Amino acid sequence: MCGIVGYTGKQECTDILINALSKLEYRGYDSAGIAVFENGCIEVEKSQGRLKNLVDKMDKGHKPVGVCGIGHTRWATHGEPSDVNSHPHGNKRVTIVHNGIIENYNEIKALLVKNGYVFESQTDTETVAKLLDFYYTGEPVDTIIKVIGEIRGSYALGILFADFPDTIFAVRKDSPLIIGKGKGENFIASDVPAILKYTKDYYLLESDEIAVIKPDEITFCDVHKNEIKKELQRADWDEDAAEKGGYAHFMLKEIHEQPTALKTTITPRVMDGMPFLEECGITVSMLEKVKNIFIVACGTAMHAGLVGKYIIERLARVSVTVDIASEFRYRNPIMGEDDLVILISQSGETADTKAVLQMAKERRTTTVSVVNVKGSSIARESDYVIYTHAGPEIAVASTKAYSVQLSVMYLFAFELAFAKGAINEDKVKELTKDLMNVPKVVEDTMNTMEDCQKIASKLVNSTSLLYIGRGLDYALSMEGSLKLKEISYIHSESYAAGELKHGTISLVTSDMPVIAIVTQKDLMEKTISNIKEVKARDGKVIVITQEDIEIDKEAYDYIIKVPAFNDLFMPIISSVVVQFISYYTAVLKGCDPDKPRNLAKSVTVE
Ligand code: F6R
C-alpha cells in the first residue's frame, strides 16, 4: 500500500512529482506529500486527504522549487490519516518516503528515544527516517545498509540526504519499486503508470538492492556494496492506457475495455484451435501428473478462482480447493509435491497471496500465478506465470482484471481436462472456439448499460440487499455483491439460492432487494422456485438472465437479459451487468467509484 515517486533531472520537479503521484492514488489517498531540494535544503510539503488538498495547500502557501525530490501518497497503517502522519518523514539531513510496514518499529523507537530523538508522528516510517539520521556517517549507501540490517518488515524507500542534493537513494524489500530511466532525468515509482508520461524505460529493483539515482546515472549494488548490472525493461502500456480516455471514471472505462482485454489475453494462448499454455511453460505432460489443485487469492481474484473451481472440477474432474489467502496460510493446509497451487492476483503484490506462494515453495508444491502486472513479485517468484493482458487497472474496484482472470481459468481448465483425458480434442476445440467468441458477446453485453442504470436507480435508497444464484451463478453473485458494497457502501451479501430458506430469508422484506442471477439452464427451475419464495414474502426481485431464458413475469420485478450463449461462459458475460449495476449505484449515490473510502488498489500489508 502507499505509492512513492521520485525525480532527479533538470526540470522543475514539483509538478512532475504531483503528476506521478496522481497515477498512484489508487494505492492509497489518506494523505500526500513531497520533499524537494530548494536552494540546497530539503523542503517538505504535506497534507492529509487526497492529492488535491496538497496541491491547494501549495497554491495558497509554499510550492517548493527544485529539480530533485520525492513524493508519497498514503494508505494509513500505523497512525491515523493526519498531516503529521503524512509522508515524507525526517529532518533537514535525511528525509524519506516509505511504502510497507516496519514490524520492529517499537524496538527501534525505544533505542532512538534513549539516544535523544523526539517523535512527532505515530508512524512506523518515522523510526526509519530517524534511524538513518542516527547512523549517518556522511556515506549514504553504508548508512542504508546498516539500517536495513536492523529493520524488519516490508519497505520501498525513497531517501534524500541533504549532502547529496541531486541524488535519490532507494532500497526495497517485499514492496515494489521501479527506477525509471529518462534522458538527463531519472525516476523512482511504486508502479509503471507514474512514469509513463516521461519514459517507458525502467529497471526493476529487487529485494535488498540499493539504487543510487542521479540525473545522468543510475547505479545498483547489493548489501555488500557489490555493483549489480540490471536489464532495462520497456513498458508496453502507453500513457493513454493509464488515462480515462473520455470516460467519467476509470471504472467505466475499464468495464468497456473488457472485450479488448479478453481478446488480448485469450488469443496468444490458442494455437490450432487448442489452448496453448506452453508459451508460459505449462505443458500437457506437466498437467497430467497434477493431483489436487489449490486456488488461493484475495477478494475479486478469489472470486475468479471460485469460477475456476466449478469449471475445472466439471471438465477435468480434478479436485479443487479455493481459499482466501489470509486464511489459507494459517490453516496448515495439506499440500504435496504432486499438487498445484494457483495464485491469482491483479497487482502481483498482495501480501497474503505472496505469503502463500512462499509457503507453497517451502513445501515444494508447484506454483502457477495468474497476474496482470508484469515483473511483479508474485509473477517473478512463482514457478510458472500466466499473464493476463488487461493493461493497467486504475480503479480500485477490479473489473477487467476479473474477466481476464476468468478467461485464463477457462483456458487452464480446457488444457487440464485434455491432459487428464477427461474430454477429447474435439470437445476442447469446441469449447476453445466458444471462448474465443466471448469477447464479442461481452461487447454486445455493453448494451445492457442503460437497463443497469435503471436498476441502479431502484437500488440507490436501499441500505441492504442480497445477491443469489446457484452453481456458476453463485460464484458470480459473490463478485456482484462485493463490487456493489465496496463502491456504493450499500450492505450486500451473496447467498447460494438454495440456502436462503435455511435462515437468511427471514431478512427479506419489501425494503430488501434480491438480485438473482439465473443463467444456468440446468439449475434455472430450482433458482426460479427460490425467487418465487422471495416474492411471496414481498421481496423485490431483480433477475439477470440470458435472452433465450423465459421466466414467469410473476417471479420478478425487474429483469436484465444478456445475449444468449453457452451457459459455461456466463460468468464472464454477466459480470458486465453486475459491474454496471455497482458503478451506476455508486455514481447515483454520489460516491467516487474509482476511489472507494478506506480501500487501496494494491494491498501490500497483511
Ligand atoms: C475488489 C478488489 C480486491 C482485489 C484484492 C486482491 O474490487 O479489487 O478485492 O481483488 O485486493 O488484489 P490483487 O488481485 O491485486 O491480488
Image (tube, rainbow, N blue to C red):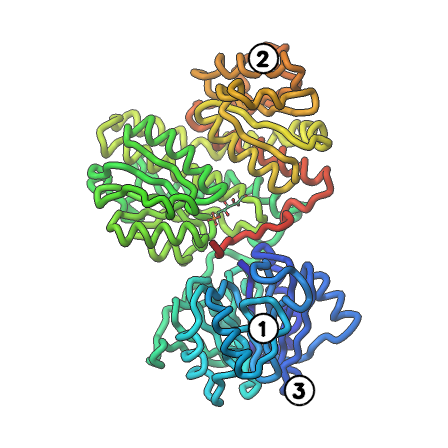
- Going by the numbered disc 3, the residue's amino acid type is Asn
Please give the name of the residue rendered at 30% of the width and 50% of the height, measured from the top-left corner.
360
Q: Is residue 109 above or below residue 242?
A: below
- Going by the numbered disc 1, the residue's amino acid type is Ile
Q: Which mark, residue 39? A: 3
Q: Is residue 412 above or below residue 548?
A: below
Q: Which mark, residue 532? A: 2
Query: Given contact means CB atoms under 8 Å apart, are the residues at marks 3 and 1 in contact?
Result: no
Disc 2 to disc 1, how far (Cα)?
Answer: 59 Å
Kindly tell me whether residue 441 is visible in this rendering: yes
Q: Residues within 10 Å of mark 2 (few under 14, many from 20)?
A: some
- Decide if residue 312 is on the left or right side of residue 76: left
Pick whichever of labels 3 and 1 is earlier in the sequence: 3
Please give the name of the residue rendered at 43% of the width and 82% of the height, measured from the top-left corner.
141
Please give the name of the residue rendered at 54% of the width and 22% of the height, measured from the top-left corner.
503
Query: Given contact means CB atoms under 8 Å apart, are the residues at marks 2 and 3 in contact?
Result: no
Residue 14 or residue 128, whichever sits in front: 128
**Disc 1: which residue:** 70
Q: Position of residue 161 (x, y in %)?
A: 54, 83
